[in-house]
Amino acid sequence: MSQTVIAIDGPAASGKGTVSKAISEKLQFNYLDTGKLYRAIGAQYLEGRPPIDAAQSLNISDLNKYDLQKPEIAQAASEIALIPEVRAALLEFQRNFSKKMPGAVLDGRDIGTIVCPNAKIKIFLTASLKARAKRRYVELYKHDGKISFETILEQIKERDKRDQTRSSSPMVAASDAKIFDTSALSIKEAVDKVFDYIQTKI
Ligand code: DC
């Protein structure tokens, strides 16, 4: 089999991380959650480091230095992701990763459109705002019993708007991406649906 790139894009809590990881395990492909790159820069930005500088010297070990799931890091990630120089600095790292054998699954916002426009398979996962906020709430409540559903819903809404409207690589489904709505699907159903589709393309 020749080297295959699978691009999986979509908004926060659309299920893309869980689905991408499961698909990479089924196919024994390499997996990169590109949101972690932006989150690691967001974390450094919160510590006072200029984001362009952090992006230009990003090291893979930086990804394990922070609790990247924190909501404030997610918000900072979506802010630094607006900066074209930050995005440019991360391009080469992501493209090199996509060349790994026997194949690679990358998830993010602009994988099918900018990072790997020639990916063999492109998926765009989406879900209603309410369904996504509910998922994130269940996840974050385990760590912080005081967090409110309304706060999470507002944070996701704000992040969606920023990710969709930025001028540099906005989040948008590639014209040749297959779109799946996961609002009413369990994790297993979403993984099965996406995997069935991938098998028809591989
Ligand atoms: O997927 P995530 O929630 O971990 O991503 C965090 C932020 O990083 C997201 O709000 C926007 C940014 N991001 C991006 O701009 N491009 C990507 N390919 C991945 C993430």
Image (tube, helix red, strand yellow):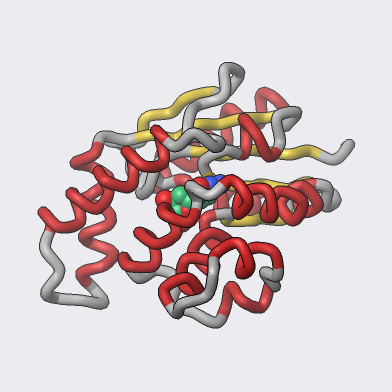
59 lies above or below 81: below
Residue 128 can be seen in this image: yes
112 lies above or below 130: above
Q: Is residue 113 left or right of residue 117?
A: left
Residue 27 can be seen in this image: no
In this view, the residue in front, 139 or 55, is: 55
Q: Position of residue 83 (x, y in %)?
A: 53, 49
Residue for point 54% across, 64% down: 51
Farthest-out residue, top: 175
Specify the quadrant that holds the N terminus. Answer: top right
Specify the quadrant that holds the C terminus. Answer: top right
62 lies above or below 82: below
Q: Is residue 73 left or right of residue 138?
A: right
Residue for point 54% across, 62% down: 36
Farthest-out residue, right: 2
Q: Position of residue 18 (x, y in %)?
A: 47, 53
Residue for point 54% across, 69% down: 50
Q: Is residue 8 left or right of residue 82?
A: right
Q: Quadrant of residue 174?
A: top right
Q: Position of residue 186 (x, y in %)?
A: 33, 44
In this view, the residue in front, 79 or 22, is: 79
Q: Is residue 57 left or right of residue 23?
A: right
In this view, the residue in front, 133 or 25, is: 133
Q: Position of residue 22 (x, y in %)?
A: 56, 52
Residue for point 52% across, 75% down: 49
Q: How many marks?
A: 0
